Amino acid sequence: MKTFDGLRLDVRTYGPEDAPITVVLAHCWTFNQADWHFQVRDLLREFGHQIRIVTWDHRGHGNSDPVTRADARIVNLARDMSDVIDTHAPNGKLVLAGHSIGGMTMMALAELRPELFQRVVGAAFISTSSGAIDTVTLGLPEMGPLLRAQIPRMLAFRSRTLTRKARRRAPIIERQVMTRFVFGRPLRLADVALAVEGLINSPGDTVVGFYNDCLQHERTSALKVYDGIPTHVVVGTRDVLTPPSHARRIAENVEGAVLTVVPDAGHMLPQERDQLVSGVLVRLVRPHL
């Protein structure tokens, strides 16, 4: 499908158009809709064609069109999410789930289209933040702020100077970033490989542009729209990108939200704790079938 500004998005749907409820899954920064592959599998196994599932590659990610650095903004992801819903799930109830920048997109969507939330019957914020990303130390109080700024620039430099084939052949930096700062324990090599591939496929403008915009992200007030909607907030104790304090801030600002803090897990909960995340989505869907 095409975005409001003419970009092509790679969207995939599962289940019938007239399903009574649709699960809409927004993926994380520098990945793609494969972020949710375990959850798509588990939801289809649990509910079959009773539900509809919609996933897509954000602009600048995966198989969707690239973006300029100036257009790599969370508000544009929210506009895209709005259009994805209008096109592929125009009727019926909605369960929204967002991982990392996908959760930030859900907050921007609440600012953009609060009336849409009359249809939302469940929400899951997975490893995400409502603001203050510029205070994150990556678990390294002294070096963290410097590293936080340098890692996206280093990844963008590799994107500009090396072909994707070369980076796949020797993804030393990409793998180190994933294993040191993104994943917790235990570590499954297949999960890391999938995330590294997503990172290699992310252009430099995607990496730096969305990173810079995340530093400006402050949408705690938008969480008010989720009051009264069954909402789960999930975070790992080893998440140094959007740490537990950020999850608590979300939960404290959504009336009735349930917070789950997962021991030893990192930032990639849809892979690291796939059954737990799938279980959250199943519990949000089941009352409406």
Image: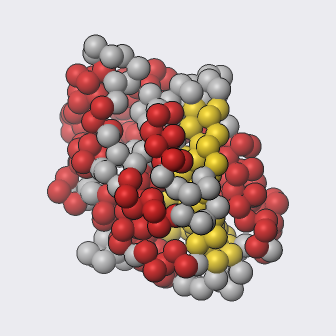
Residue 219, position in %: x, y?
35, 55
Quarter of the picture containing the C terminus is bottom right
Furthest residue in direction left, as rendered: 70
Task: Give the answer, above or below, for where 67 lies relative to 7.
Answer: above
Residue 13, position in %: x, y?
60, 71
The answer to whether any part of residue 13 appears in the image is no
- Name the residue: 22% across, 60% down: 71
Residue 6, position in %: x, y?
28, 76
Residue 89, position in %: x, y?
57, 79
Dividing the picture into quadrants, the one containing residue 221 is bottom left
Task: Give the answer, above or below, for where 44 lies relative to 161.
Answer: below
Q: Is residue 1 left or right of residue 124?
A: left
- Name the residue: 28% across, 13% down: 142
The answer to whether any part of residue 46 appears in the image is yes
Residue in front for this viewpoint, 77 or 235: 235
- Name the residue: 64% across, 61% down: 230
Quarter of the picture containing the N terminus is bottom left
Task: Give the answer, above or below, for where 140 lies relative to 85.
Answer: above
Furthest residue in direction top, as rendered: 142
- Name the residue: 81% across, 59% down: 45
Q: Is residue 189 left or right of residue 51?
A: left
Residue in front for this viewpoint, 91 or 271: 91
Colour scheme: secondary structure
